[in-house]
Amino acid sequence: MFGIRPKWGAYWMGRSGTTGETFDLARYSQRFITREYTLARRGMEAGIFLPKPGPFCKSCGVRNLCSIFGDEASELPNLFTEEAV
């Protein structure tokens, strides 16, 4: 967008409000970075947050609303059931 090629990247750790370890972005093309960022941004703007089950699910701050593990998930459509297909 601004003609600046980012050299380093880091994950934002929303729970702690910090960033993770930085890593070199040289292996990723500008096209790849732009596509990934654009897709993520579109999802956030549309309110779409897809679950990605893993070992950190136990400590997730929104687990109660998760369509896979949540106690309150019955209020949300479960896209992972046979009926939803």
Image (cartoon, helix red, strand yellow):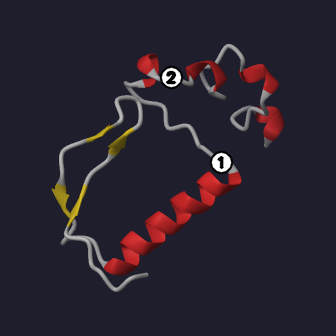
> What secondary structure is found at the residue carrying circle 2?
loop
Q: How far separated are the C-alphas under marks 1 and 2?
A: 17 Å
Where is mark 2, residue-wise? 61
Q: Earlier in the sequence, mark 1 or mark 2?
A: 1
Residue beneath the point at 72% across and 17% down? 72
Residue shown at 39%/25% (left/top)? Answer: 56
Q: Secondary structure at mark 1?
A: loop
Disc number at residue 31? none
Q: What residue does disc 1 label? A: 48
Residue 77 is left or right of residue 11, and the answer is: right
- Where is residue 42, by image quadrant? bottom right
Q: Is residue 74 above or below residue 37?
A: above
Instruction: Give the side of residue 5 with respect to residue 17, left or right.
Output: left
- In the image, 6 versus 49, the foreground residue is 6
Q: Is residue 46 left or right of residue 33?
A: right
Hey, what amino acid is under mark 1? Ile
Q: Which of the image's four quarters has the C terminus?
A: top right
Image coordinates of residue 34 in percent, x first then y, are 43, 73
Report x, y in % for residue 69: 59, 20
The residue lying toward the viewer, choosing from 71 and 80, is: 71
Residue count near mark 1 (Cα–Cα under 10 Å), binned few <14, some 14–19, many ≥20: few
For image coordinates 19% across by 70% down, the residue present is 7
Q: Position of residue 1 (x, y in %)?
A: 43, 81
Q: Residues within 10 Å of mark 2 (few under 14, many from 20)?
A: few
* Residue 2 pos. (x, y %): 38, 82
User: Residue most toward the top?
Assistant: 71
14 over 71 or under it: above or below = below
